[in-house]
Amino acid sequence: MARAPTPLREITGVMEEQRRALLAGDFAALDGAEVRLSQAAGRLNAAGLSRDDLETLAALAARNARLLAAARSGLDQVRARRGGGATPALMTYDARGRQHGGTPVGATLSRR
């Protein structure tokens, strides 16, 4: 019969799963990780962790926080590029190379 993992092993395991998911861009794999971390963290007080254990947890948490921030930044950049709304759907250029956005009112483009 296998023993239940200690809260420290459980937390480090979840943090490693988070790391792998973030590096792979598998955001669906992050579902539920917050709840599992929170539950294991609630059991840490009874675990009697050493200073080294706490430093290890802090380093893992800082690493994952950096990965989460980078993922959020990347998603924000994509969101801004795709749905910013500032750029018209069609960009055209005149004979002098000046950029014009969109089609003039009442004008349509057709291809013959």
Image (spheres, rainbow, N blue to C red):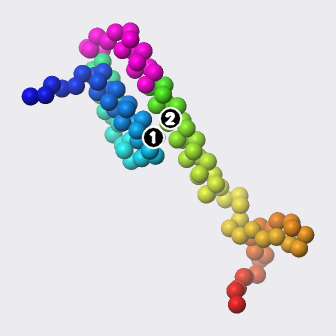
Q: Residue at x 39, y 47 (%)?
A: 28
Task: Give the percent coordinates (x, y) of residue 58.
Answer: 44, 20
Q: Residue at x 81, y 68 (%)?
A: 100
Asked whether the residues under the numbered discs 2 and 1 touch, taking CB atoms below 8 Å apart as contact, a structural biologist would say yes
Q: Helix, strand, or loop for circle 1?
A: helix
In the figure, residue 98 lies in which quadrant?
Answer: bottom right
Q: Helix, strand, or loop for circle 2?
A: helix
52 falls in the magenta region = yes
The kind of residue tagged 2 is: Leu
The kind of residue tagged 1 is: Leu
| Of 93 and 2, the residue lying toward us | 2
| Of 68 and 2, the residue lying toward us | 2
* Magenta portion: prevailing SS class: helix
| Of 15 and 24, the residue lying toward us | 24
Task: Give the percent coordinates (x, y) of residue 93.
Answer: 82, 70
Neighbourhood count class around disc 2 (C-alpha, 10 Å): few under 14, some 14–19, many 20 upward = some
Determine the residue located farthest toward the bottom in the rendered image. Answer: 112
Which numbered marker is on residue 67? 2
Q: Residue at x 75, y 68 (%)?
A: 91
Q: Residue at x 75, y 74 (%)?
A: 103
Tell me: residue 106, above or below residue 1: below
- Is 23 left or right of 13, judged from the image as shown? right
Tell me: residue 96, above or below residue 34: below
Q: Earlier in the sequence, mark 2 or mark 1?
A: 1
In the figure, residue 6 lies in which quadrant?
Answer: top left
Q: Is residue 42 visible?
A: no
Q: Where are the magenta residues, as a range?
A: 45-60
Say which residue label 1 marks.
22
- Is 40 left or right of 88, judged from the image as shown? left
